[in-house]
Image (tube, helix red, strand yellow):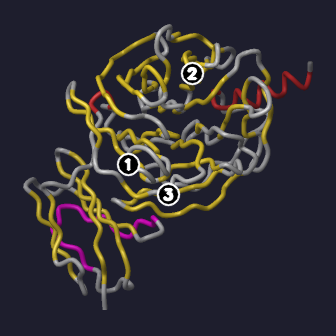
Amino acid sequence: MILRKYLFISFFCCFSLTTLAQVTAPAINCSTVFFTVNVKGQIQQWSLLGDTVVGGDVVLNNCGRSIAYCGENNSQFYAVNPQKNGVIFQNSDTSWANLYGDIKLVNGGGHLNDIFFMGNEGGKNNVLFYFNGKSLEVVERFEDQIISSADVAVDNQGQAWIFIGDDLSNNTHIKVYSRKGLVKSYNLTMNSKHIYGSFFLNDVLYLGMGARGLNPNTITPVLIKGDKVELGSPVNFDGTNMHDMASCNNGEDNSTSDIKKMLDHNISIYPNPTTGHVNVVSDEEILLIEMYDANGKKLLDARNQTSIDLNNEASGQYYIRVHTASGKYNKTVIKID
């Protein structure tokens, strides 16, 4: 009984700052970082920089097949227990605690204190749960359809985004839920087979596409404008042997009901490649230019400027993020000697 109480408190640490098992927050940039779990149960850390993914360092082992992340202030991972019902939860920097339950869970997602799980009843992914820190609450039980992409993405409003369809190959809707129930539904017909994960990054919903099926070996953004939904340009990412995805989702504008993809249609950068200076041209006023190196380290914050000086930087690839009144736009620039 004492052991079970300790394990419950460990799992509860997403909801409390004072627990028996605190984990030191990793030094990560929640605006660029996402995580995957592979077939070996290893959690790997990646960074999405413009239209390029870098990284792949293993940060934790023995995860099983699923992964979720509480957020940058409560930095523990949790996952579905691969052997029994319930979940496993990061108990320390390198180990997991078990919290057994009588409900078969498939996967989950979270943002800070808002944690959702997908449940399996009758061999189907057909239940959405909310974890309130003490128990699982049924948010929705699907009678005639299933959750067609086996993951839950939670936005920075604490809302769960799930894909609904007739089977794992036939997605028909995206549905958005709060703890209290359905918030909004979008029509989206697509082949959802081999989609292994979903996550938010800077208010953009991404899907992890496996080695087969739609947009193989990519992460693909879901673009939402008003009531219309479409898939954006995929970003190359090897999804071979991946099981799931998560992020700490540091969205900034709190308008996730109208998710914005960081488009680049009104931004141009020249010369590219460059030997030194780069000019940035936009249809709108440029408020801020950020520059990152290939490892995700920020090198520059330039306000109210329209050029960047790379003369003192080494040859290689750099990532430029341009802020205007309408959003954030990403470009890649190559520095040559």
At 61% across and 62% down in the image, what residue appears?
57
Answer few, some or many: residues within 10 Å of disc 1's Cα (few below 14, many 20 plus, some between 14 and 19).
some
Q: Residues within 10 Å of mark 3 (few under 14, many from 20)?
A: some
Q: Which residue is mark 3?
A: 238
Q: Nearer the viewer, residue 215 or 227?
A: 215
152, above or below 40, in the image = above
- Find residue 121 and report its horizontal and vertical position in percent: 63, 14
Q: Quadrant of the N terminus?
A: top right
Query: In x, y percent, where is residue 111?
Result: 51, 33
| Residue closest to the eye, 47 or 80 | 80
- Tell me the SS state at disc 1: loop
What amino acid does circle 3 point to? Asp
- Judged left or right of residue 280, residue 240 is right
Type of amino acid under label 2: Asn
Q: Position of residue 135 (x, y in %)?
A: 68, 14
Q: Secondary structure at mark 3?
A: loop
Q: Quadrant of the C terminus?
A: bottom left
Magenta stretch secondary structure, dominant: strand
Q: Mark 3 vs mark 1: which is more N-terminal? A: 1
Report the amino acid beneath label 1: Asn
Sequence-first disc among 1 and 2:
2
Judged from this view, the residue extending furthest toward the left is: 283
Q: Vertically, is 261 above or below 123? A: below
The residue wearing badge 1 is: 215
Residue range highlighted in magenta? 296-309
Q: Residue 125's mark? A: 2
